[in-house]
Structures are given as C-alpha cells and as structure tokens.
Amino acid sequence: MQTLPTILLRPGEADRVVAGHPWIYQASILRLTEPAADGDVIQVKDHRQRFLGIGFYNSKSKIHVRMLANERVTIDQGFFDERIRAALALRQKHLPGATSFRVVNAESDFLSGLIVDKYEAVLVIQTSSLGMDHRKGMIVGALKSIFTPRAIIERNEMSSRKFEGLPNSNGVIDGDLGPDASTPKVVEVNGLKFEVDLLGGHKTGFYLDQQVNYRLVGERANGAQVLDCFTFLGGFALHAARAGAAHVHAIDQGAEVIEAAKRNATANGLADRCSFETANVFDWLKAQTLTRPHEKVVPRFDCIILDPPSFTRNRAAIPDALRGYKEIHLRALKLLKTGGTLATFCCSHHVDASMFQSVILEAAFDAHRILRRVATYTQSPDHPIIPAIPETEYLKGFAFEVAR
C-alpha cells in the first residue's frame, strides 16, 4: 500500500476519534505532513505519531477529515461492498421482511457522507462529502453487485453539498425507471402501499425513519377520532385507519402531498375512514381553538399526532423552534379529550429529548392539562444510533395520555 499523506492532531484531540467520532475539524489539526488533494485518502495520527486511521480529506470543508477506518485499508469497490453488506445485514436483523428501508445511514454505518435508501427495486443515493462523491462509480458498482436494482437514482440537492464544494445533481444514474420516470412509484411500508416521488419528493421520497413508529402509534388509535398534523403522504393517518380508528382527519400545507395521501387511502381501501385537508397546521390549530370571552374549547379528538418538519437547522434557531413547538402543543392539547393520546415527534438534532419534553410540559401547564407519559419513540433501526456520534440521533418522540 502506498504511503499516504498524514494529518497530525493537536494534543487532546485524538480522544474523540478513538471513541469513534469520524469528524475532524480544522481546529483539531496540528499539521499536514505533505500536500494532499481534496477528496484524497489520508492517514491520521495523534501528536505522538500514533496511527488512528484513514479518512477522506477536504481542505474546503469545515470537516477537514471524515474517518473511514481505524486500520490501513484500500478504499476501492471491495471496501464499499463489504461495508454495505454489513449495513444490509443489520437491517435484515432488525427489520425482517421490510422491502423499503435505509440501507446506509452515513456515520451510523461508518460511511460518513453516504446515504442509500431502498424503495422496493430502486435505490436512491446521496453523497454529501467530496470523497464519497468522487467514488460514486465504486459505490454504484457495489450496489449493483449486492442488489441488482432496477435503477439507481441520485438525490444530491442537499444544502450540505455546497460546504464541500459540490454542485447539485439529481436524476437516474443507472438502470431505468420505465417509460415515465417522473411517475410516482408504489412502495410498501408495514403492509400498506404508498406512492412515492423518488425524483422530487421530500428527503429521498418518504420518511423511512418513522417506519416503526407509524405502526406503534397507529396501534393506539383503535376506535379513536384522530387528528394527524403534518401528514405528508398519510403515513400515520393510514396506519391509524388500518388499526381501527373511527375516523382520521389529516392536514398538510402541501396540496400535492394531500392529493397523494388521498390516493394512498383509496389504494389501501381506507378512504371511508379518512378525510384530508390542505392547510397550514399552525393556522388551522389556532382557528380551531379561538374562543370568545367566557367560552371554552370543546375537545373533540381522542388522538392527535404531531410530526412537523424540523424547526431548526442550527443552535441559533433553538429559541424560535421551542416557541413553535410550544404553540402547536398548546393548541393541540386544547383539542384533546381527557384520556386521549398525544403522539408527538421532533426531528431536530439540536433539540434533545429532555428539551423537547420540557416544552411539551410547559404547553400542558398553560393548557391546564396533566399528562401521563405512556411511550417513548426513536428513529427506526435502519437509522441506527451510535452514542459516540451524537449527530446520529435526531428523531425523538413521546406518547402522552391526558390524565386530566
């Protein structure tokens, strides 16, 4: 193996790497022993010249090095084949029978900068680091060897790519989606069918990280009048309806996704139990809880589901995000019957579970409700969490019953 350029870390900066965190920032670097091209593989040592591992180098990124291995290995198609097969085995262990799931979850699978989602026979990839993007051909080759997919799509329009000096890129890069590539594809999640826009939908087309939670929350809705806020394609709504909800009213501000959710309800034989509305959830909740002096809101839902998009992308936005979370919970609790269930989620890494629960309890105090926590939720196991890498944990959720 050829000698690699070496980055030496400052004293005290090696501990995070040894513990398993793959990101090395510029401030942690003592020096680079010889020039290295952005996107190249380099080796990392501590200030005493002890070998720590190898990774991708990018001087233009805040993350100067993304660690790949703690031993000297060749980064070729065989490397990606081995890592992806190991990630797949983990999914087969924890999500047996699933046909749509996240195959590779970047840092969680020791492939920082790479995401691979499987939607039936189609794979969607995202490369958010320069080193991964330069090796897209190797990655595609490994994926074809493992899955023999009908098509492989790249959805590389994430904002994080600009920090790596990468342009946006979106489309089919291998295989064929059929005569009308833009037509949404039907995927199965927990036995329910959903049409998914793989070329233009949110994220890579669907919220796969909620796959387990869709089922768990749905099971709490038997016989209930349900309000599903931020429904997107109807994930929670249809699971609740299938589980025996008396009726589900689902809201999202996107007219296109509401129409898709309606079609999904029909395709699964659940349209008679569901209604859908295009509306801004904040405005809708506010309108439903407005009262005149000396009037009270009459609660009418047995179960309310709140699954909003992230309210914050950085730490500076946390105060505004918490105000937003408190507002929707305050309004929702006014509409929830005593004994009813509030299932609520936060997908911002910057708002941890303790902070999220605190803002819910503040809303409950203002709404004069006492809550009993009955369940705690996290992201599906195809989005594994490595505690040594806090960034791998972002989705958290709770189910509360209104005690009084």
Image (cartoon, rainbow, N blue to C red):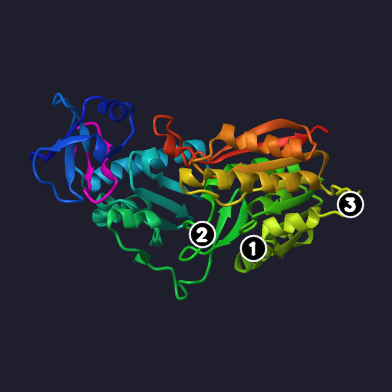
* Residue type, label 3: Pro
On residue 144, the disc is: none
Inspect the image, locate mark 2, and give the three-letter code of the amino acid beneath it: His
Residue 41 magenta: no
Dot in front, 3 or 1? 3
The Cα atoms of the two marked residues, 3 and 1, are separated by 30 Å
Q: Which mark is first along the chain, 1 or 3?
A: 1
Q: Farthest residue toward the right? A: 294
* Mark 1 residue type: Gln
Compared to residue 182, the image places residue 12 above or below, namely above
The answer to if 62 sits in the magenta stretch is yes
Q: Is mark 2 on a helix, strand or loop?
A: loop
Pick whichever of labels 1 and 2 is earlier in the sequence: 2
How far across and how far down the image is residue 235, in percent?
63, 53
Work out whether residue 252 or residue 384 is closer to the camera in this orientation and state it: 252
Where the C terminus falls, by quadrant?
top right
Neighbor class of circle 3 (other Cα within 10 Å; few <14, some 14-19, many 20+) is few
Query: Which is more toward the observer, 36 or 136?
Result: 36
Q: Name the residue under label 1.
A: 253
Tell me the element at label 1.
loop
Residue at image coords 10%, 46%: 35
Query: Which percent across, then down, holds residue 379?
Result: 53, 40
Q: What is the magenta range? A: 55-73
Q: Where is residue 250 in the image (x, y as percent from the top left)?
A: 71, 57
- As helix, strand or loop, the secondary structure at mark 3 comes to loop
Residue where numbered disc 3 is placed? 293
The answer to whether one can see residue 98 in this image is no
> Which residue is found at the position 54% from the left and 52% from the top?
207
Residue 308 appears in view: yes
Q: Distance between the residues labelled 3 and 2?
A: 42 Å
Residue identified by numbered label 2: 202
